[in-house]
């Protein structure tokens, strides 16, 4: 829907400051709400554990992870997509005489239900775009509030942030939220001449920031549906 894309390095550049600020701010709010002043000012007695030298499999794993991270950050230079780099890393981890685990053991540990679920949600997202359902959702769902005719980009982005922040209450899967919400939101951005990168960034940050549900959504869906 949009000719623009965000590389891994750009996403890291945009998202890391928000992640750091949100982590500290969230921790501060939780401490203020649930700890009294005495416990809040009490110093943590953290036991210092002596770190043992890394074993050979651990060094190999660390090397492969750093290699994958480097390739993700330099995607624009070599042209390898994130998925391709991930597959290469998986092959190296399970390669005979070099990997840190056997291929059979790795296959047994794969959550195939999750892979099928992710594939289905990606197909859902493609269907929303190709069938015109994204356009229908925007033209009908937002019509009652006249948000699609608003000239205030700030008001529109605020509404998108609220929808994204509360989306984990009615859709417990990160992938399902992205597949169902991102296409309509991008269509809204294109129809109102809003930067699609801004809309995508705000919406995905909100979808992953799950702090408004009393029972953690991850535990709920894992207990009921067996989805991690």
Image: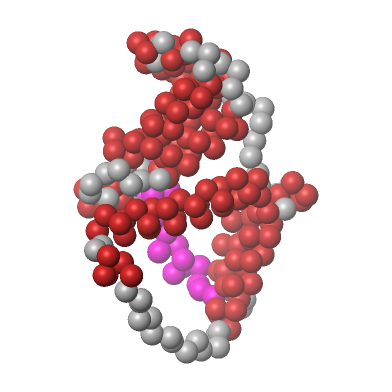
On the image, the x and y values in percent for residue 123 come to: 46, 32
| 207 sits left or right of 16 in the view | left
On the image, the x and y values in percent for residue 50 come to: 47, 89
Figure quadrant of residue 3: top right
Q: Is residue 214 above or below residue 69?
A: above
On the image, the x and y values in percent for residue 174 come to: 40, 43
| Pick the front one: 186 or 123 | 186
Q: Is residue 204 above or below residue 94?
A: above
Q: Is residue 100 among the parts visible in the rendering?
A: yes
| Pick the front one: 223 or 103 | 223
At x 66%, y 31%, the residue is 4
On the image, the x and y values in percent for residue 46 come to: 38, 81
Tell me how many marks there are.
0
> Residue 116 colored magenta?
yes
Q: Which residues are magenta?
A: 100-117
Q: Main secondary structure of the magenta part?
A: helix
At x 45%, y 51%, the residue is 22
At x 51%, y 89%, the residue is 52
């Amino acid at each position: 829907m949009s000719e623009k894309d965000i590389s891994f390095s750009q996403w890291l550049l945009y998202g890391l400051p928000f992640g750091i600020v949100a982590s500290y701010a969230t921790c501060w709010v939780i401490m203020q709400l649930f700890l009294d002043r005495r416990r809040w000012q009490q110093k943590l007695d953290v036991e210092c554990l002596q770190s043992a030298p890394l074993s050979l499999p651990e060094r190999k794993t660390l090397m492969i992870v750093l290699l994958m991270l480097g390739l993700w950050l330099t995607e624009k230079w070599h042209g390898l997509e994130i998925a391709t780099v991930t597959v290469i890393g998986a092959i190296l981890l399970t390669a005979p005489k070099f990997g840190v685990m056997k291929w059979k053991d790795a296959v047994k540990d794969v959550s195939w239900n999750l892979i099928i679920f992710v594939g289905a949600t990606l197909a859902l997202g493609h269907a929303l775009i190709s069938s015109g359902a994204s356009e229908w959702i925007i033209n009908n769902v937002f019509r009652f509030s006249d948000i699609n005719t608003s000239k205030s980009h700030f008001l529109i982005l605020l509404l998108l942030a609220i929808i994204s922040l509360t989306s984990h209450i009615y859709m417990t899967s990160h992938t399902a939220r992205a597949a169902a919400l991102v296409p309509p939101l991008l269509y809204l951005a294109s129809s109102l001449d809003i930067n699609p990168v801004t809309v995508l960034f705000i919406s995905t940050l909100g979808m992953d920031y799950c702090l408004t549900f009393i029972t953690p959504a991850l535990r709920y869906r894992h207990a009921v549906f067996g989805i991690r």
